[in-house]
Image (cartoon, rainbow, N blue to C red):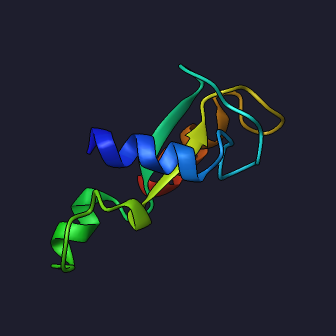
Amino acid sequence: YAQNRQHRYERARGRCEGCGRPVGPGEWQCDHIVTVARWTREKRPGSPNQISNLQILCTLPRDGAPKGCHALKTRADRR
């Protein structure tokens, strides 16, 4: 997972894939597009940690998202 996480960050060119803002160390989280729980429940093939199921989301405050895009996505996943 750690290797795929870093690779995804490089593919995102150091930018949040939610809002496009540049992010550096400590300013982003690697998020599962399809949550691990849903991946398992739906019995999808492969690993939920594959690069195509990961996205880089900021943890920086911005308009409408005081804790960044990652917090918005996490909140949506829990609904």
Does the rendering let one see residue 41?
yes
Instruction: Report the residue at 34% width, 49% height from top.
Output: 4
Does the rendering let one see residue 75?
no
Instruction: Report the residue at 60% width, 24% height from top.
Output: 27
Indicate whether 66 appears above or below 50: above
Closer to us: 70 or 64: 70
| Relative image position of residue 15 (x, y in whole percent) | 68, 42
Give the quadrant of residue 72: top right
Residue reaching furthest top? 26
| Relative image position of residue 47 (x, y in whole percent) | 21, 65
Instruction: Report the residue at 39% width, 44% height from top.
Output: 5
Q: Is residue 71 left or right of residue 61?
A: left
Closer to us: 30 or 63: 30
Instruction: Report the residue at 63% width, 25% height from top.
Output: 24
Check the picture and name the quadrant holding the C terminus.
bottom left
Numbered marks: total? 0
Indicate whether 14 appears above or below 37: above
Give the quadrant of residue 51: bottom left
Check the picture and name the quadrant holding the N terminus.
top left
| Relative image position of residue 38 (x, y in whole percent) | 27, 67
| Relative image position of residue 68 (x, y in whole percent) | 66, 34
Q: Is residue 2 left or right of residue 63?
A: left
Closer to us: 48 or 13: 13
Residue reaching furthest right? 63
Q: Is residue 3 left or right of residue 17?
A: left
